[in-house]
């Protein structure tokens, strides 16, 4: 887990315990004696907001207060940490891609089965006794 992910986890953990608007710097990082640049704080905050884990009071302000969203609360409640949440989201995305691939493959197999069914039906018709008799009469009558 990189440093930004650790800080994101600390932020989410604090917001999980205090589900109200907080200042990242004043209410979370400074009391824990964590020194991070404003740029890094802004990047972490933006990432958490894009994932809909936090809500920003003033998105364009570098000192905006933030609050955990229901999705963010559930992420910590279900997975325990930001890192575990991210890993689970990656697994979910991989599973969804695999399911989509299998659905596409299944559609191809169904189409192939339909084509084989049609060919079998036509072959069965042509090889049936009544069809052979009709073909034989048709061929004999042309001569």
Image: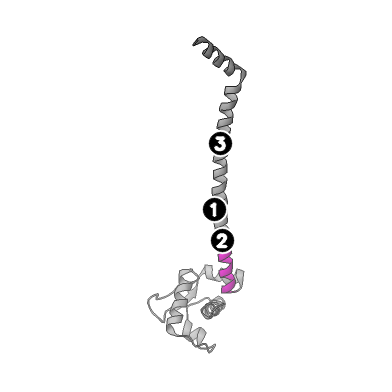
**Of label 2 and label 3, which has the lower sequence position?**
2
Residue 93 sits inside the magenta stretch: yes
* Separation of marks 2 and 3 at Cα, in angstroms: 30 Å
* Separation of marks 2 and 1 at Cα, in angstroms: 10 Å
Residue 14 percent across, percent down from the top left: 55, 79
Residue sitting nearer the eye, 7 or 127: 127
How is colour applied across the structure in the image?
one colour
Judging from the image, what secondary structure is the residue with disc 2 in?
Answer: helix
Residue sitting nearer the eye, 130 or 42: 130
Judging from the image, what secondary structure is the residue with disc 1 in?
Answer: helix
- Please say if 131 is above or below 33: above
**Marks 2 and 3 close (CB-CB < 8 Å):** no
Q: Residue at x 50, y 70 (%)?
A: 53
Q: Residue at x 57, y 56 (%)?
A: 98
Residue under label 2: 94
- Please say if 68 is above or below 113: below
Residue under label 1: 100
Residue under label 3: 114
């Amino acid at each position: 887990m990189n440093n930004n992910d650790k800080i994101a986890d600390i932020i989410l953990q604090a917001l999980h315990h205090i589900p109200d608007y907080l200042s990242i710097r004043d209410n979370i990082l400074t009391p824990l004696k964590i020194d991070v640049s404003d740029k890094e704080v802004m990047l972490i905050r933006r990432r958490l907001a894009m994932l809909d884990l936090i809500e920003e009071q003033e998105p364009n302000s570098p000192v905006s207060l933030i609050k955990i969203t229901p999705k963010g609360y559930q992420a910590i409640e279900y997975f325990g940490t930001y890192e575990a949440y991210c890993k689970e989201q990656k697994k979910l995305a991989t599973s969804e891609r695999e399911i989509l691939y299998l659905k596409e493959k299944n559609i191809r197999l169904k189409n192939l089965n339909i084509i084989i069914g049609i060919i079998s039906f036509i072959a069965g018709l042509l090889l049936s006794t009544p069809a052979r008799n009709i073909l034989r009469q048709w061929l004999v009558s042309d001569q």
